[in-house]
Each structure stands twice: as structure tokens, then as C-alpha cells.
Image (cartoon, helix red, strand yellow):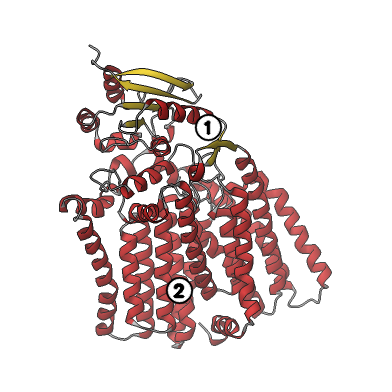
């Protein structure tokens, strides 16, 4: 990188040191205001009434009550998140509200970490813009009919905890780049060990990102094999120590074999055909001709939107246009965007994220080669951090590569890439224009117009989704809002369960419905609390039937759910027929709320009671 081109990152850092306290506080104040507004607007709408988050509440409740994870409480991922949530319940009481406040604290840490990281690779302005996008579109939002795809009540805490710990590891890398110390490397390693105790895809992305940053540092500084070995040991040893310590602590309550299976078991799910080969994961990845076509089509649309202001900003180098004309031009571009993009659909607007991150990686690598050739270590530092952040973003995108989005799993998997692109259009491209004599302000104004249009349009969509969550479920600290389609039947059945099923009796909700167990405070017996098509395919019906026979529930709830996304539409009709036959033989109907389950699109719940004598 030439000295003139390399000066911008240094100037950014210097400017940050020379800023007044008010200037330094402006960004966090704006982000906090946006977060508080979204928190108040979306309050109580975050969890889904039946899907996913009930499992998170139920698992934390049972572990906090003394049940052993993996032995008494089924769990398919690492132990960190359920143990952390259970600790929150023990300290502050068992309630949905407790978990909400714990997750808001984790969210605040994540925001602080990303503000520092994005400010280090860009400016405070870019970091502020990116974090406003984050709190508005990712942290609290709900863009699909189901809840859970947010940072307050995530469908898997391993996702939000993992990405927060990964950002902390990247922050340790950033600190090491500023002031090299083995302590920062060891801290990053320990954090990676904690990420390992969650979901494998988050760990792989974080480990590769941190390792690549350290490798790039060694490549720039050329210290020799001895220092390189010590750095590798400083990273790997703490990570391994955390994993071994977690396994040992688990083995205090369960057998060593169960503890090892709990820590390492998630890695067995990754290659398992029942999971990775299912229609659900194929749909999430989006590897179809239509999705590939749409990816490039949307990329072309964004180029068409951003090239005109780029060209105008470049032209300002040789023309003295009035500010009024500049403002009119930017407003015209924004108006064109607002009228054009709805034809495409805002929820598809992030499709080109993988292409954008690959472009950022390519330019960053080119800059690193120039910095190494020039011997400019100061210029290399922000580039190394950008490399690590972009690698982390790209590897997270791998699971939704051809269907990148901000909703559904994209609230975590697409988030780092989206924020990096915001920094690119607010900081990097304007700085590049300015170095060539153009008008950075013109392009930045257009960029803010684009971001404003995106935010407003998404908030309109969000308002429609939130308006459907008006039915109250739960009481006290467990109160939240559900949709009108399922809320009434769920609340009525909860009343029935509390009158009919005594606290000592067990209740199994099939194929999914642990939220009912949690809200009623009724235990689900046996190792299989959910029987979605993936679980049935993975464990096998023979194994499930043996477990049911060994631990027959006193009551069973058949909860209507369309599982077409997993390749089979209805439990008992399209999969799990042998389990359904066992239920028919051993249980009798008690009461129905709503429509009869698994017959058509109407929602309903059927309560079954174990019969005194099996049917012949």
C-alpha cells in the first residue's frame, strides 16, 4: 500500500484520540437512543408462542432446578448457553423476564464490542451507522411470522452467545495489534474455547478469523518460526484448557462419557445426513438456480443504485457545483431507490452480501501485500483486523450463502457482513473518493439516503408483523404477546393443563411445544422432548419408542405444526407414524382446543391421557 493510501487508517485513529468528549459520546448516544426506541416498540413480541424459544426456557428452568444437562434434560449443542441461562434463573428467579434482561446485557456487550471493532477498521461515523442498522434491523426485529430471530429471545442462545464471544476474541486480536502481548492472544484463545462450547459453525468462523489475523501479523512482521510457535501455543493452549475444564465440570454431575458426548456431540451433527441433508438446511442454504440468479440480479440492482452517486462524486473533482444541486441530486437518487426497490422486495436486498464480502477480502489482501512490500506495519494493522472481520462474516454466511438475508437465521449469520458493508459505503468508499479529489460528502449523503430508505421500509414491514402479536400469553414475568392464530388455543389449553395435570405428573408436547411445559411448569419425561422430522430421522423411531415405553408421560399434547420445511408436513401422517400408533394404543383423548391437529391449516391442540389399559 502506498504511503498516501495508507495514511487514512492512521488519520482515523489519530482523529479518534483528538476528538472532544462530546464527539466521542455522540455515536454511543445515537445508538443507545435507537436501541431504546426499538426495545420499547417491540416489547413483549420477541418470543414465539410455541417454536424454539420454549425449549430455551424449559432447559434453563430444569437445569436451574437441579436436573443434569444431557442426562435429565435433552440438549444437542454445547453446554455453555443452557448453563449460563440456568445461572441467571438461579440468581434472579425463573421467568421469561429474567432471560430477557440477561440477553439485553449480552446484547449491550455485543454492541460495545462491535462499536470498537468497526471504529477500528473505519471511523466513529461508520461504526455508528452500522450499529444503528444493527439495533433497528437485527437486534429486536421480527420480519417473519415466528418470533425468536432476534437477540432478546433467540431461537438458539448458542448463536447470540457465540457471536458475542467471537467479537470479544476479535477485540483481543485488535488489542494485540495495537500493543502486542501474549496475554491478549491467550485471552482470545480462552474465548474461542468458550465459543467451542456452543455451535460448531460459530467456532469455525471465529477460530479461522482469529488465526488468520495472527498469521497475517506474522507474515507482515516476519519474526521467524520460534515466535510463531509461541503465538500458536498461546492461542491453542487456553482454548484446549477451557474445553477440558468444561468437560471435567460436567463429569461431576454426569458420567465422563456423557460429559464428553455433551461437549463434542455437536460436531457429530455437522456431517450427519439427517440434519445437513434435510430439506430445511438445503432451503436455508438456497443452492438453486433461481437463488443464484436472484443473487446476481440484486447485485446488479445495487450497482445501478450506487454507481450514479459514485460517478457524480467523482465528477465534483473538476466541477464546482452548488450544495443545493448536490442535495437535489441525492434526494432524486433516494426517491428513485424508494420507488424501485419495493419492486424487488427489501427482504431480498441482502442477497449479494457474499459477493460484497469477497470483494472486501480481495481489496484487503491487495492492501496487505502492498503494506508488506512497503514495510508499513502501521498501515497493515487495520487491514489485518478488516481481514479477520471479513473472514468471520463470510464463514458465517456459508450456511445461507445463496440466500443471504437479515431475517430468519440471517439475524446472526448475515449480520457481520451487513455491518461491514455499511462501513464500506459510509467510510471506505467516501475516503477513496476524497483521496482522488472527488466529493466524499456527496457519496456519503447518498449512502445515508440508501440506509435511511432501507430502515424506513423495513420498519413498515416490522409494523405489520408486530400488529399481529396482540394476544396475551403467560402471567407476571412470563407474560408476552402471541399471534391471534395460535394464542387463544394455547392460552385455553394452558388453563386446562393447570387444572388437569398435577405438578407431579409429566407432560409431553409433540411434535414441538416445550413452551407449554415451561409456562405450566410441568416436566417433560425421557430424552426426546421434541419430535420434528430431523429428530425422528436422526434417532430412529425404534430408539424413540423404547424411550417412550421406559418413560411414558402421564399426559401428551398433540400440537398442530406444519413441518413442510423439514420435508414432511404433518406428524403422525407424513412421519412418526409408529410413534403415533403407540400413542393411539396407550392414550385416550381428554379435550381439544382449536381445530383437530394435523388435518389442515387450522391450528389446534389435543390433550391425551395415559389409558389404564392399552387398547387391543
Q: Residue at x 38, y 76 (%)?
A: 216
Q: Is residue 432 visible?
A: no
Q: Residue at x 46, y 43 (%)?
A: 288
> Residue 157's spot in the image, x, y percent?
40, 52
Indicate which label's residue lies in the foreground, 2 or 1: 1
Q: Which residue is mark 2?
A: 385
Q: Residue at x 52, y 75 (%)?
A: 120
Image coordinates for residue 39, horizontal then vertical, percent: 59, 54
**In the picture, residue 541 is in which quadrant?**
top left
Q: Earlier in the sequence, mark 2 or mark 1?
A: 2
353 to the left or right of 443: left
Q: How many other residues sit within 10 Å of disc 2, few (<14), some (14-19) or many (≥20)?
A: many
- Does dot 2 land on a helix, a strand or a loop? helix
The residue lying toward the viewer, choosing from 21 and 331, is: 21
Q: Position of residue 464 (x, y in %)?
A: 64, 41
| Label 1 crowd bin: few (<14), some (14–19), many (20+), radius 10 Å | many
- Residue projecting furthest to the top: 616
Closer to the camera, 58 or 331?
A: 58
Q: Quadrant of the C terminus?
A: top left
Q: How many marks?
A: 2
User: Tag on residue 299?
Assistant: none
- Residue carrying label 1: 487
Is residue 342 something that shows in the picture?
yes
Give residue 318's position: percent from left, percent from top: 76, 78
Q: Nearer the viewer, residue 249 or 390?
A: 249
Amino acid at each position: 500500500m502506498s504511503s498516501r493510501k495508507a495514511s487514512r487508517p492512521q488519520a482515523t485513529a489519530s482523529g479518534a484520540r483528538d476528538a472532544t468528549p462530546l464527539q466521542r459520546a455522540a455515536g454511543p448516544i445515537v445508538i443507545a437512543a435507537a436501541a431504546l426506541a426499538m426495545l420499547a416498540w417491540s416489547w413483549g413480541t420477541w418470543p414465539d408462542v410455541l417454536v424454539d424459544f420454549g425449549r430455551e426456557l424449559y432447559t434453563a428452568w430444569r437445569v436451574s432446578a437441579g436436573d443434569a444437562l444431557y442426562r435429565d434434560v435433552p440438549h444437542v449443542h454445547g453446554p455453555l448457553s443452557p448453563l449460563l441461562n440456568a445461572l441467571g434463573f438461579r440468581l434472579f428467579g425463573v421467568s421469561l423476564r429474567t432471560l430477557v434482561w440477561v440477553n439485553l446485557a449480552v446484547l449491550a456487550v455485543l454492541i460495545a464490542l462491535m462499536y470498537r471493532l468497526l471504529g477500528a477498521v473505519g471511523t466513529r461515523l461508520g461504526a455508528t451507522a452500522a450499529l444503528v442498522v444493527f439495533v433497528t434491523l437485527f437486534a429486536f426485529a421480527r420480519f417473519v411470522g415466528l418470533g425468536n430471530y432476534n437477540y432478546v429471545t433467540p431461537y438458539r442462545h448458542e448463536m447470540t452467545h457465540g457471536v458475542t464471544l467471537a467479537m470479544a476474541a476479535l477485540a483481543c486480536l485488535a488489542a494485540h495489534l495495537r500493543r502486542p502481548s501474549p496475554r491478549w492472544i491467550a485471552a482470545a484463545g480462552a474465548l474461542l474455547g468458550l465459543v467451542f462450547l456452543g455451535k460448531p459453525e460459530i467456532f469455525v468462523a471465529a477460530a479461522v478469523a482469529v488465526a488468520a489475523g495472527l498469521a497475517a501479523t506474522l507474515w507482515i512482521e516476519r519474526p521467524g518460526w520460534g515466535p510463531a510457535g509461541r503465538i500458536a501455543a498461546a492461542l491453542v493452549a487456553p482454548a484446549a484448557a477451557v474445553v477440558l475444564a468444561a468437560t471435567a465440570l460436567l463429569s461431576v454431575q454426569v458420567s465422563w462419557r456423557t460429559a464428553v458426548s455433551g461437549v463434542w456431540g455437536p460436531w457429530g451433527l455437522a456431517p450427519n445426513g439427517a440434519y445437513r441433508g434435510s430439506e430445511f438446511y438445503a432451503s436455508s442454504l438456497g443452492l438453486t438456480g433461481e437463488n443464484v440468479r436472484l443473487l446476481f440480479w440484486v447485485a446488479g440492482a445495487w450497482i445501478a443504485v450506487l454507481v450514479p452517486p459514485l460517478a457524480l462524486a467523482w465528477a465534483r473533482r473538476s466541477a464546482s457545483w452548488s450544495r443545493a444541486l448536490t442535495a437535489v441530486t441525492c434526494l432524486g437518487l433516494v426517491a428513485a431507490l424508494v420507488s424501485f426497490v419495493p419492486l424487488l422486495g427489501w427482504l431480498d436486498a441482502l442477497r449479494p452480501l457474499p459477493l460484497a464480502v469477497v470483494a472486501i477480502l480481495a481489496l484487503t489482501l491487495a492492501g496487505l501485500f502492498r503494506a508488506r512490500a512497503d514495510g508499513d506495519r502501521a498501515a497493515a494493522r487495520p487491514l489485518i483486523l478488516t481481514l479477520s472481520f471479513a473472514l468471520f462474516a463470510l464463514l458465517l454466511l456459508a450456511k445461507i450463502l445463496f440466500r443471504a438475508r437479515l431475517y430468519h437465521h440471517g439475524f446472526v449469520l448475515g449480520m457481520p457482513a451487513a455491518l461491514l458493508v455499511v462501513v464500506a459505503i459510509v467510510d471506505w468508499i467516501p475516503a477513496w473518493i476524497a483521496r482522488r479529489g472527488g466529493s466524499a460528502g456527496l457519496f456519503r449523503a447518498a449512502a445515508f439516503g440508501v440506509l435511511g430508505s432501507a430502515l424506513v421500509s423495513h420498519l413498515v414491514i416490522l409494523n405489520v408483523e408486530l400488529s399481529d402479536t396482540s394476544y396475551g400469553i403467560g402471567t407476571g414475568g412470563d407474560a408476552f404477546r402471541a399471534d391471534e392464530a395460535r394464542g387463544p388455543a394455547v392460552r385455553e389449553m394452558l388453563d386446562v393443563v393447570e387444572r388437569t395435570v398435577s405438578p407431579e405428573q409429566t407432560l409431553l408436547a409433540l411434535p414441538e411445544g416445550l413452551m407449554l411445559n415451561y409456562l405450566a411448569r410441568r416436566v417433560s419425561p425421557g430424552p426426546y422432548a421434541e419430535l420434528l422430522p430431523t429428530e425422528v430421522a436422526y434417532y430412529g423411531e425404534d430408539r424413540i419408542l423404547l424411550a417412550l415405553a421406559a418413560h411414558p408421560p402421564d399426559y401428551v399434547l398433540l400440537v398442530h405444526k406444519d413441518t413442510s420445511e423439514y420435508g414432511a408436513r404433518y406428524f403422525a401422517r407424513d412421519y412418526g407414524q409408529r410413534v403415533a400408533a403407540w400413542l393411539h394404543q396407550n392414550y385416550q383423548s381428554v379435550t381439544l382446543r382449536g381445530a383437530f391437529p394435523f388435518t389442515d391449516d387450522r391450528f389446534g391442540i389435543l390433550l391425551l391421557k395415559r389409558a389404564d389399559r392399552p387398547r387391543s
